[in-house]
Image (tube, grey):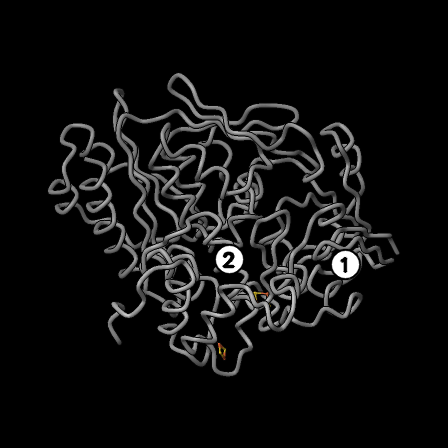
Amino acid sequence: MTKVSMTVNGKAVARDVEARRMLVDYLRQDLDLTGTHVGCDTSQCGACVVHVNGKAVKACTMLAAEAEGAKVTTIEGMASSDDDLHRLQVAFNDHHGLQCGFCTPGMIMSAAALLSENPTPSEAEIRHYLEGNICRCTGYHNIVKAVLAASGQDSAALAAE
Amino acid sequence: MYNFEFVRPSSVADAVAALADEDAMALGGGQTLLPTMKARLAAPTKLVSLSGIDGLSYVKTGGDSVEIGGATVHADVAAEVADAFPALAALVARIGDPAVRNRGTIGGSVANNDPAACYPAAVLATGGTIVTDKREIAAEDFFQGMFATALEAGEIITAVRFPVPQAAHYEKFAQPASRFPLVGIFVARFASGVRVAVTGASESGVFRWTEAETALSSDFSADVVEGLTPSADGLIGDLHGTPTYRANMIRVMTARAVAAAG
Ligand code: FES
Ligand code: FES
């Protein structure tokens, strides 16, 4: 067992874990932060996306030990309270960017990373950036709409597919 | 995944020492190695992370070459070579997806030499150099077939150096599920001639299509490629495409790459 320490959603945490502990299991099982999901565990689906030092990563494909000393943000860190959701969460709600909601934590975290790199992405840029996030329900259209809306752009212009 | 011992040394010398153990493996960004270990296709007893080593993540541009530190992640390469070597930036910006590009490293990709990886095509087409903790290896000598390279046990890639061509383009026909190229072509035009590297297609990994190189060196046009017929011998046949299909794709993608390189 090794001690792995990091800052998660602004809080310093430390746990003794096996070397093979993945970051996603550290978050979900050791810290009980179950908002981050595991869809595939093979780096395909993006349900596990979190930010490590501000960068989107697939937490199922990063060792917890590699995040030693890092600043990690998960979906739980996006809203300060139920009444004060992140603008992406509001937009997903307004534009029906989710159905079952399984992919949503990863979608929000990826979309947040996109908006921090590129505050007003085009529809094509949004689709390209979300390539590593799979949604079985929505057909993506409303997710793209929600990201457009969250970036302050006109999402009504997006043609129905 | 079986458990292992994890170490994160802070210098190349310490990493080399840690890798001296039998069954120790170097860990770059882990975007290939960790899934491989989950599938129990690899079971190192010790992982030596290269992420804690200072000075292994950088991009140096200048003159007519670009040098990239072995532990540099794809996202940083894409951003930092955009002006100096736009064709390489475009290749890197389409590896995997954004989250994978934030972890995966150039050293990891090149050391793994997946027959469908993108980076090896750029290294081979430009006649690049792989710099390790003990020597420099020319691309020609480095790639030795599917998942095989000239690296010795415990040898670490510290940098990769690319001569910057006068014109270049990477054309990738992505397999939509994996986002790896079904066929990827890197065309590089230098004053001394044209080089064409093919990835994704061959059972022996990345290779140069010399017939196209000769033709393109005297007439750099897509038309000249249209007249060639790449051989299907030794090409990969799987559920995504037969060897004949891949051979045809080599011609089509090379013509597109030449047209785009201008
Ligand atoms: S659970 Fe990590 S990518 Fe699917
Ligand atoms: S809302 Fe169900 S998977 Fe995306």
Image location (x, y in percent) of residue B196: 30, 37
Name the spot of residue A123 as percent of width and height, x first. Answer: 32, 60
Q: Which residue is mark 1?
A: A20
The three-letter amino acid code for the residue at tag 1 is Arg
Q: Position of residue A87 (x, y in %)?
A: 50, 64
Is A37 located above or below residue B153 in the figure?
below
Q: Residue at x 58, y 71 (%)?
A: A40
Nearest the viewer among B12 and B103 is: B103
Q: What amino acid does circle 2 point to?
A: Ala
Q: CA distance from mark 1 to mark 2?
A: 28 Å
Quadrant holding the N terminus of chain A:
bottom right
Asked whether disc 1 touches disc 2, contact meaning CB atoms under 8 Å apart, the reply is: no
Left or right: B182 as drawn, with respect to A66 = left
Chain label for disc 2: A
Reading the image, the residue beneath label 2 is: A112
Residue in view at x 65 percent, y 57 percent: A73
Residue A106 shown left or right of residue A156 in the figure: right
Q: Are marks 1 and 2 on the same chain?
A: yes
Q: Where, by quadrant of the figure, is residue B151 drawn?
A: top right
Q: Is mark 2 within 8 Å of ligand 2?
A: no
* Relative to B7, A124 lies left or right: left
Which residue occupies the foreground of this view, B184 or A42?
A: A42
Residue lying at 17% horizontally and 45% vertically, measured from the top left: B228
Instruction: Check disc 2: other Cα within 10 Å, few if <14, some if 14-19, many if 20+.
Output: many
Instruction: Tell me the quadrant of ligand 1.
Output: bottom right
Q: Is residue A84 above or below residue B211?
A: below
Q: Which element type, helix, strand or loop, lies under badge 1?
A: loop
Q: Quadrant of the C terminus of chain A?
A: bottom left
x then y, percent, for residue A55: 57, 49
